[in-house]
Image: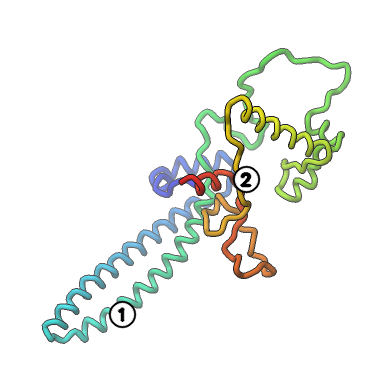
Amino acid sequence: MIDLKFIRSNPDEVRAAIRNKNEKADLDALLELDETRRGLQFEFDQFKSRQNQVSQTIAKLKREGGDASALLEEMGSVAEQIKAVNGRLTDINAELESRLLTIPNLPEASVPIGRDESSSIRVKTGGGQPSFAFTPLDHLELAEKNALLDMPRGAKIAGSGFPVYTGFGARLERAVINFMLEFHLQRHGYNEPVSYTHLRAHETPEHLVCRLLLENKKTKQDHKNFCLITTSKLLHTTCTK
């Protein structure tokens, strides 16, 4: 997620990134929401400051036997205003957080701008290009022909381009993972990786956790705060900090 201060200070740069990455984020709506939030925050701080000041005055009047009824009445009104403004701030902060998640990261300056991969630039070619007496198949065609991957099922689960490994393809993937682990364990003195749980028992940022579990009404109530973990980064930062 891009820092809001950066977006506020560099709107043109962020707007260009949205356009160049063919995204549909509404930057103007986000900036307008941010302006509203800052105005409400200022209003909230003013009310709180007034409340603190008058509270001290009321305490002093009571110690001296003075009449604080007018100030107490004012504070009742101020408390209601604080509650109302705080409610609006809560709603706006939630919407702002949601809109921030739609803003893409800025692309590296050297990345060519284009609508799809056809705009990519070939930077380097290594080795000679082989020739065949037959029409060669690419890795996806070979994988599907030999039932190593199931792309349609992968698309149903995660969208276009994500595979489901099947048969020998699943065995091959597992073998490559095991080879990598054993290679580094034996050659480089690594320790055996820790096997973690797949659940996290408390709230985490949206970009780290997919809140799929316990949204279902059939799930037990006492597990209502569990989330499925989608990245190893979360596991390591939680267990080592």
Figure quadrant of residue 67? bottom left
Pick the residue in front: 198 or 191: 191
- Name the residue furthest left: 64
* Tag of residue 129: none
Residue 224 position (above or below residue 3): below
Name the residue located 51 percent from the left edge and 33 percent from the top edge. Answer: 108
**Do tag 2 and tag 1 residues touch (Cβ < 8 Å)?**
no
Q: Residue at x 71, y 47 (%)?
A: 159
Q: Quadrant of residue 180?
A: top right
In the rendered image, residue 186, in percent from the top left (x then y), is placed at: 63, 27
Residue 195 has which mark?
2
Q: Residue furthest top?
A: 128
Which residue is more in the foreground, 143 or 17?
A: 143
x, y (%) of residue 227? Answer: 60, 57
**CA gap, disc 2 and disc 1:** 56 Å
Instruction: State the residue position of label 1.
Output: 77
